[in-house]
Amino acid sequence: MAVLGATYWNLIDALKMQDLGAEAAIAEVLHQFSPFLKDANVQACNKGTKHAVSIRSGLPSVSWGALYQGIAQSKGGYTTVEETTGFAEGLSSVDTRLLKLHPTETGKLRLMEAQGFIESMAQTLESAFFYSNVFTSPTQFHGLAPRYNSLSNVNVIAGGGSGSDNTSIWFVTHGDMQTSVLTPAGIPSGLQREDKGEVRVLDGSSNPYYVKEEYFAQHAGLCVKDWRWNARVANIDVSDVIAGSVKVNALMRKAYHKLQGTHAYQMDKPGVASPGRTVIYMNRTMYEALDAESTNRPGGTDNFVRLTPMEIQGEEVMSWRGIPIRRTDALLNTETLVS
């Protein structure tokens, strides 16, 4: 079976190369809460906290040759786009008096409090990868939804919804030439954790006390070098899907055939220097509906593509047409209608 992390550079690989030890362990925890980070291809920014990307806007022309005639000159067209990064941060504080009451459980108590911050950080980033918009939230980075926000984009499929209970299903191809998570130059990859030790703080009445404090931060951005390798099924009416009047398989099939190449997860795409790997993202409601469609009733027959298990980094996940499916709670059932 295909192993996603065996060929491509992901967040844990980047951390291990930095020899960060404990931070690599934190990344393992972070991945439990962030499906997108499990698959992400990681690149360092080439302009500090920003990343300049050259995107091909036109192909060079070629011509038929003839003996004793020259070759017409031509060149490709390129556009430079500058991607940005942002950072999320949090402080975990545990009253030192509580720690003294449980001297043998100090590490456990601090970890319990820290784990809430780790999960919150992961959820914040996961949501940002899909919905963050630098035009409305300039301290963040540009996510996928504001890039695929119009039905005039051929890789955005209309799901048929028109109300306020809409969601999306995403096909995202991770790779150097497709979609990457960015980290600023000189900043370690992944979640950073700093033990600040004992710190004097004030309560709500401005009275002082002491806490053991930990600082958490993660810098990240998103780069889409070639938009053709991603696809979005937007405006999926959740209530209609639950009622059974909208078929998820049919919508996914339309998105699948919009991708650059329709060989999706296979790593030996002919003619592609850096093929990446495609992953499907949907929330639990859509996953349950897809699972229901892909299971025959007793005696029933249909032509749906069945969900099949595959292994990724030792983890068994379900796949659709050989593409792994990730369930993420970051994808809302209340998305704004895409027009």
Image (tube, rainbow, N blue to C red):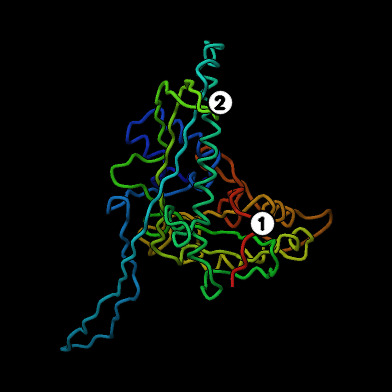
For label 1, the residue is 333
Instruction: Residue type at mark 2: give it.
Output: Met
Does residue 327 appear in the picture of this structure? no
Q: Is residue 78 left or right of residue 336?
A: left
For label 2, the residue is 112
Residue 51: percent from left, percent from top = 32, 56
Do the CB atoms of the residues marked 1 and 2 lie less than 8 Å apart?
no
Residue 83: percent from left, percent from top = 36, 58
Q: Nearer the viewer, residue 198 or 3?
A: 198
Q: CA distance from mark 1 to mark 2?
A: 30 Å
Residue visible at 46% across and 54% down in the picture: 277
Question: Which dot marks residue 152?
Answer: none
- Please tell me in which quadrant of the rendered image residue 299 appears: bottom right
Does residue 73 appear in the picture of this structure? yes
Residue 125: percent from left, percent from top = 49, 47
Instruction: Residue type at mark 1: give it.
Output: Asn
Chain-order first, disc 1 or disc 2: 2
Residue 306 to residue 186: above or below = below
Q: How many marks?
A: 2
Q: Is residue 184 left or right of residue 323?
A: left
Q: Nearer the viewer, residue 54 or 299?
A: 54
Dot 1 falls on a residue whose secondary structure is: loop
- Please tell me in which quadrant of the rendered image residue 70 appears: bottom left
- Pick the quarter of the image with the C terminus: bottom right
- Please tell me in which quadrant of the rendered image residue 306 appears: bottom right
